[in-house]
């Protein structure tokens, strides 16, 4: 009688075993789906960050060019540092960078010295046990800002009438500018800082 009871116990345990295995498989697939979605969101955030920074860096370089062009006209400096110089929008750089990260970008200036980008991945989350993910794309937003690192300091009272203001820059020594020798001027990264805004 004992062998028959053993076969009966084994028969009863088999459905439980199948149920447990099926449950574990479902959980594994669910975790995989979550991982797919998280990876797609991460791709979208990377694209948004890179695109916003690219636009801001392009504008930083154009502002630095404006400062160099007007280096002998110090009355124009503050407007340049405030972002009021006539430089075109650099949203084209955001779209270009987003495309390199396999995404599309909706870009808009954020004030005079910033850009906000909404990036959407070209790829979808893909097939998973979660319905609708095969068509779902990820969308993330990033804002990059440009901040002037320097401010003009008026020449000394006894300075020559043609003397230029010096530049006092964050974390660096001052730039003393000689109008007769402009071979060593600050670079764009010396004049402006570019970073992502805190979310």
Image (cartoon, rainbow, N blue to C red):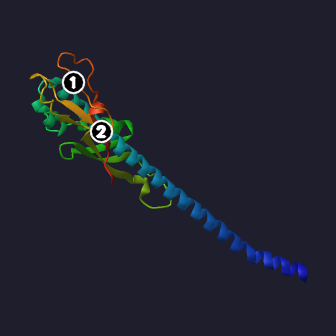
Q: Earlier in the sequence, mark 1 or mark 2?
A: 2
User: For numbered disc 2, what is the local secondary structure?
Assistant: loop
Residue 131: % across, % down: 44, 61
Other-residue count near label 1 (Cα within 10 Å), few / some / many at <14 / 14–19 / ≥20:
some
Residue at image coords 17%, 19%: 179
Let me know if residue 94 appears in the view: no
User: Foreground: 7 or 72?
Assistant: 72
Name the disc covering residue 177, or none: 1
Q: Position of residue 40 (x, y in %)?
A: 43, 50
Where, quadrant-wise, is the C terminus in this rendering? Answer: bottom left
| CA–CA distance in space, label 1 to label 2 | 17 Å
On the image, the x and y values in percent for residue 172 come to: 32, 34
User: Which disc is residue 170 wearing?
Assistant: 2
Q: Is residue 199 left or right of residue 21?
A: left
Residue 197 image label: none
- Count of number-bearing discs: 2
Q: Position of residue 167 (x, y in %)?
A: 22, 32
């Amino acid at each position: 009688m004992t062998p028959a009871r053993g076969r009966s116990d084994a028969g009863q345990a088999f459905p439980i075993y199948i149920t447990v295995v099926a449950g574990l498989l479902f959980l594994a697939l669910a975790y995989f789906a979550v991982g797919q979605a998280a990876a797609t969101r991460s791709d979208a955030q990377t694209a948004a960050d890179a695109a916003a920074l690219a636009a801001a860096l392009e504008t930083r370089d154009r502002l630095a060019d404006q400062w160099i062009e007007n280096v002998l006209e110090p009355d124009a400096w503050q407007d340049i540092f405030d972002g009021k110089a006539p430089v075109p929008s650099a949203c084209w750089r955001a779209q270009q960078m987003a495309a390199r990260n396999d995404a599309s970008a909706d870009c808009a200036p954020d004030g005079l010295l910033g850009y906000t980008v909404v990036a959407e991945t070209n790829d979808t989350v893909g097939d998973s046990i979660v319905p609708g993910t095969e068509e779902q794309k990820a969308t993330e937003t990033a804002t990059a800002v440009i901040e002037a690192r320097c401010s003009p300091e008026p020449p000394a009272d006894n300075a020559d009438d043609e003397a230029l203001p010096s530049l006092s820059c964050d974390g660096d020594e001052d730039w003393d500018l000689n109008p007769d020798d402009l071979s060593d001027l600050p670079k764009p990264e010396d004049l402006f800082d570019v970073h992502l805004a805190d979310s």
